[in-house]
Amino acid sequence: MYLVADISVEICASKSCKLCTQYCPEANTILYSEEMGRDQGFKYGTAYVAVDRCKGCAQCVWVCDNMAKNNAIKMIMIDQLPKAALTDNITYGEKSTTAVLASPVVG
Amino acid sequence: MSLDYVKFSNGFEKFMPKEYRDMVEHGPFGKKVSVSQMGSFKEILEEHPMCAGCAMTLFIRLAMIAFPNPEDTITVGTAGCGRLAISQAAIPFVYGNYGDQNGVASGLSRGLRLRFGDKPKDVVVMAGDGGTADIGFQQVLHSWFRKERFTTIMLDNEVYGNTGGQESGMTNRGAVLKMAPLGKKFEKMDMLQMAKVAGCAYVATVVPNNPRRVESVIKKAVLIAREVGSTYIQAYTSCNIEYAIPTDKVMEDAKTVENDRYQFSEYVSEEAKQYLTERYGYKEFLPKPAAPAAAIPSKA
Ligand SMILES: Cc1ncc(C[n+]2csc(CCOP(=O)(O)OP(=O)(O)O)c2C)c(N)n1
Ligand code: SF4
Ligand code: SF4
Ligand code: SF4
């Protein structure tokens, strides 16, 4: 098993600064949704991770903890994530993206 | 090399992979995208085999977002880690022998001008410090002396990363590497000074822990190279493998190195300043308005 980044919608959607998106070394990996978060009553949308592209470097964790000072990202074993975003289930819109979450590991 | 190459051929749309469809419909082609919109549009860089957490990867990702016209851009690279990612993007990539990138780019940029006349086609070289300052040194310097109009970006990880840790001219004095066990005996080469002496119109240093600055520097360099002359960016892009930087500390290291030997610096020739101002509406080079005279206290 291996670690991937997991962003807490609850914590991120209070700030949603998008810094992690700008610092992840991998392209199209930390995406941003205007809807996720707002649809749960939080102030903003949220960043989320396309876990099939995440290489597990944890740079986003450092950025969220130290630059955003929001501690919204944790590294989690991929089989411990009940649901996550995968590239195939992500839809790009005009200003933001949406994802249908699914189990990342077919077991 | 135009918006035409990022369209679906008639009847093929439904057979194209999702990533390709996203690129055509939500990619940056023909639009202005910026770092602040990252995470909301489909980037042109695809998956690639560079190491997890590599700062060079982040820099390449940011560079591709910063290109002013990705649909009219060709990248040129050479042996070294960077090409593993630069080649995996929806931008034509030319790969030559190790060190010949600035020679290849000279011919390419001249050929494009002959073929397309005034329509800007941007050529951007991205190569490692070994490829730029050691093996390709002669071709790099000569392209600058000839004022070839393209951008050279050095991905400076201060080591030969792709081949397991030999010292390069850009390695710091004293650095001990796997294949330089006695420590480097000479100083890091001053390529910035050489670029200025050779007549580059724009010379800048940058570190990827400031994405907006990377974006701004690359935009200026590419625009200036369209007409004024050679431009050079030297980017600190650490190798977390050869320098044993834990991947979650790569940005901390970038900050430390920025404060130590990689402070932001930017040289813009007078001609380039005028060109950016007149042609592209840059305001930062306009003469600063004289400070208002101190208010004279009115007598009560
Ligand atoms: C003519 C030639 N000599 C040697 C090599 C082997 N080689 C491949 S990459 C590389 C070093 C690359 O170092 P650098 O340019 O600093 O880029 P980095 O991998 O550090 O990004 C070498 C020596 C080669 N490909 N071609
Ligand atoms: S850095 Fe943290 S708070 Fe900012 S968008 Fe990312 S997860 Fe949310
Ligand atoms: S762990 Fe690394 S690759 Fe994964 S989302 Fe975070 S920064 Fe990106
Ligand atoms: S070897 Fe170093 S420079 Fe090359 S991809 Fe890995 S971390 Fe990056």
Image (cartoon, rainbow, N blue to C red):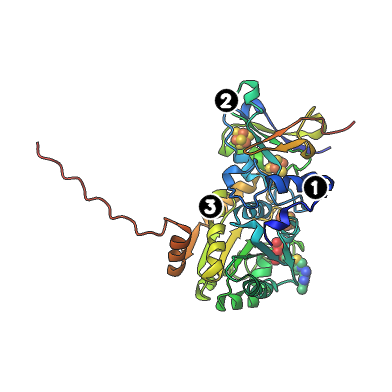
Q: Nearer the viewer, mark 3 or mark 2?
A: 2
Separation of marks 3 and 1 at Cα, in angstroms: 37 Å
Q: Which residue is mark 2?
A: A43
Residue B161 seen in the figure: no
Is residue B229 positioned above or below B165 on the image? below
Helix, strand or loop for disc 3: helix
Is residue B163 positioned above or below A104 on the image? below
For this orientation, the residue located farthest to the left is: B300
Q: Which residue is mark 3?
A: B213
Helix, strand or loop for disc 2: loop
* Residue A28 image position (x, y, % from top left): 70, 44
**Residue type of the residue flagged with mark 1:** Glu
Q: Quadrant of ligand 1?
A: bottom right
Separation of marks 1 and 2 at Cα, in angstroms: 38 Å
The residue under the point 79% across, 40% down is A52
Helix, strand or loop for disc 1: helix
* Residue B176 image position (x, y, % from top left): 68, 62
In this rendered view, identify the residue nearer to me: A88 or A59: A88
Q: Which residue is mark 1?
A: B13
**Residue type of the residue flagged with mark 2:** Lys
